[in-house]
Amino acid sequence: MSVGFVRLVLVEARHNPGLWLCPFLALTVGYLAHRALMRGIWLWPDTGLSILSTLLVIGPLVGGLSAWQAGRNWRRGTEELLAATPRPAPVRDLAAWSATVVWHLLAYAVAAGSILVLAYLGDAGGPFTLWPVVVGLMAIVACSSVGYAAGHYLPRGFTAPSVAAVLFLALQFLSREPSSAIHLAPLGASLTRSAFFGILPNVFPEQAIWLAGLSGAGLGAVVIGRRRTAPAIGFFALSLALAALGAALLLREPPWADSRQTEAGIRPYDPVCATEEIPVCVHPAYAKWLPEAAEVVSAISGPFAGIPGGPTRAEQVHTSVVGLEPDGTLQFFLHDASSLEYWLALDTARVLVGDDGSTSAASSDSARLAIEAWLLRRAGGDPEDAINLSETPERTAAASECFARLPPEERRTWLRAHYADLREGRVTLEDLP
Amino acid sequence: MTEVKLNRLIQAFGGTRVLQGLDLKIGLGVTGLLGPEGSGKTTVMRTLATVIRPSDGTLSIQGHDPADEEQRRSLRRQLGYLPQALGYYPGFTVRAFVEYFALLKEVPNKEVDSAVAQAIRRVGLHEHAGSKLGSLSEGMLRCAALAQAIVNRPQLLLLDDPMSCLDPEQRATVLDLIRDFGDHGIVVFATRAVEEVGEVCEVVVTLTDGTITFCGSVGELAKIGESSDRLENSALERGYRAVLAEGKS
C-alpha cells in the first residue's frame, strides 16, 4: 500500500458523508445495545450478542450509505475527469470504499467499546468473548462491500434506499428463519446468553468465512466491472467460493447452535446466597437479582421448609428444566428480567407441588393447582395463572381461597401430613381442608 | 518527442461516424481546435485525453501508444485535461479537489503539497483554497478544474472550452497560463470563439462535421479572410467563416 494511496483514502475520508454520520451510527449502536442490556443484568455473552444484534439496523444503513458513495462520480459527473488520470479505476474505488467503511467500522467499534466498558464497570459476569464484536465488524465490512457493488452497477439515486431496504428485509427474514439459514444473518443466534458455560466459538468461525467471502465478492464485482482481468476474475471467483463454503458450513449447523455451548461444560463458580427460611443461591453473575429472587423463592418455598421431602435449599441452575432434587435442592431458572418477574414464581410453585406442567383433567391436578394458586398469591403473583389451567376453575379457586384462610399452623400440619401425596398427585380437591 | 499524431482516426458511436478519418500532427505550442457545435471538437479532445479509444486509425501521443495499458498510464501522468462538461464534488474544498487529482495523477508524494499550492495560485484561487467547491461561482469552478488539470505540470494540456463563464480577470489569467504552458509543451484548446484562438494560438485546426477543413497558422487563416468582402468582422473571423462555408459545401 503506497503513501499516495493512503493519502487518497485520507482525502476521501475527510469528505465522506460517513464522517458526519459516524456519531449518529455510534449513538444508534450504543443506544440499541444498551437498551437491550438494560432489560436484564450485564453478562459478557449477553453484552456481545446485544452489540451484534444491532446489525439489524446498522447493516442496512451501512449498505445504503456505501451504495450512495459508489454512485458519487456518476451523480457528480466526474467520471470524465477521473478517466483521464493514471491511477487505475479499481484503486480509486478501493480508496473511496475504504474511506466509507472506515467510518462505519469506527462508529461500530466506538459504540461496541463503550458498551463493553459499561459492562466492565457494571461488573458483568459470565465468560468474556470478543467473537460477537469481531463478527459484527466483519458484517459491517460485508454490508458495505455489497452495498458499494450495488451502487457501482446501479449508480442511481434510488439504489441506496433500495439496498438498505433489501438488506433489512434479508436480515429480518433470516433472523426469523427456524432453519440453519438463521446463521447467515449474524444477529446472535449463535451463542447462549448464559453465564454458566464456557465460551465455544460455535458458528462464529463459519460466519467469519461467509462474511469474508461476501466482502471479497462485493469488491471483486466492482473490480470486474472496471476491468475484466484474470486476477480480478480469480479474486472474485475465490471470494464467491469462500462465501459458498461459509454458507455451506453454516447450513450444516443446527438452527440453534447455542445448544453446542453445553459442550464447553459448566465453568466452576462459587454461588452467592441469601439466608431466608432456606438458603437461596444464585450464580455470582446474577447477584444483582439475588434479593428479588430470594424474596420470591422464599415466599413460595417457605411453607414447605422443614417438611419431610420439602426443599432445604434453593439454587439457580443453567437449564429451564427444573425440579426438586432428592437431596432437597429446589432448582430454579433465572435468565432474563421476564424470568425474574413472572416465570420464577410460577415455575417454583409448580415444582413444589409436583406439577410437571402437563395438566390433565384429573381432579388431583386441580388440587395441585389450588395449592399452586395459593403459593402464587403469597409471592405476589397472579393465582389465575394456575387456576385457569384447571378444568373446574371455580371449584379450584374456592378450594385455594379456603386453604389460604386456614390458620398457618393448621396449614403447615396438613402440608406435613400430605405433602408427599400432593406431589404424587394423590390428593383431590375434596381432600383439601 | 513532443508531438501528437492522429493517423486516419475514426470515432463512431452506434453506427454514426463523428470523426471521419482525421490525419493531424500537433507539435509544441498552443493549437486551437475551432469548430461549430457538433463538429467533433469534444470527441477529439476526449480521444486525446485517452477517455475513449479510437474506433479505427491510430493515435500516438508523446511517442506513447494509448492502446497499450502501460503506455497509456505513463502518458496520463503527463496529461492535463479540462473537459467541457465539468463535474466536481461540492463538499470538497478547492485544495482537497486539486490534491485529490494530484494523487490520482501519481504526482510524487513529496511534491504533492507544493504542486497543489502552485496550481491553485497559478489559476488565481489561492484566496479561496479553503472554500468548498459548492460555494464557488461558475468561473471559479472552471479555474479550480483548470488547477487540477495543471497540478501535474503536464506536457500535454487539453482544454475543452476553458473560457466559458470566466470573468475578464480570470480570462486574462487563463490566457497567460495557456501561453506559458504552450512555451514548454503542447496545449490543445478547443473553442467555438474565433477571437480566443487569435489571442493565444499559433496553429489553428478547424473541424466541420468530423473532418479537418483547415490546418495552419493563425495568420494563414486570417489571410483567407482578407479576400472576403464581409468587412464587419475581423480577418480571422472572416477566414474562419470562409473555411466553414467551404467545408460545408
Image (cartoon, rainbow, N blue to C red):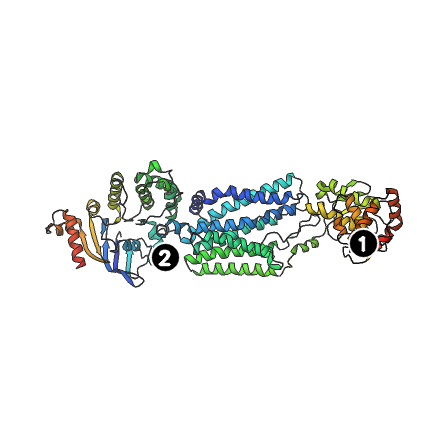
Left or right, B93 with respect to B181, comes to right
Which label was assigned to residue A313?
none
Position of residue A363 measured from the top left corner of the image (x, y, whole percent): 82, 56
Q: Is residue A102 left or right of residue B236?
A: right
Evaluate whether label 1 is on the same chain as label 2. no
Percent coordinates x, y for residue B83 in the rendering: 31, 50
What's the amino acid at mark 2?
Glu
**Residue, disc 2:** B69
Q: Residue furthest front?
A: A394
Which-is-in-front pick, marks 1 and 2? 1
SS for callout 1: helix
Q: CA distance from mark 1 to mark 2?
A: 87 Å
The reply, left or right, for residue A40 in relation to residue B68 is right
- The quadrant where residue A211 appears: bottom right
> Is A392 situated above or below B166?
below
Q: Picture coordinates of residue B138 (x, y %)?
A: 31, 43
**Which residue is depicted at the point 51% across and 49% down?**
A61
Tag 1 residue: A366
Chain label for disc 1: A
Q: From the viewer's perspective, is residue A225 above or below residue A410?
A: below
Q: Position of residue B117 (x, y in %)?
A: 35, 39
What residue sits 70% from the left and 55% below the top?
A263
Would you call the spot at circle 2 few (<14 residues within 10 Å), some (14-19), or many (20 or more)? few
User: Circle 2 sits in a helix, a strand or a loop, which is it?
Assistant: helix
User: Would residue A175 appear left or right of B110 to someone viewing this image?
Assistant: right
Residue lying farthest to the bottom in this orientation: B15
Query: Would residue A430 be visible to someone looking at this image?
Result: yes
Task: Confirm whether residue A94 shows in the render.
Answer: no
Q: Inspect the image, locate mark 1, and give the three-letter code of the amino acid beneath it.
A: Ser
Output the chain of dot 2.
B
The crowd level at tag 1 (other Cα within 10 Å; few <14, some 14-19, many 20+) is many
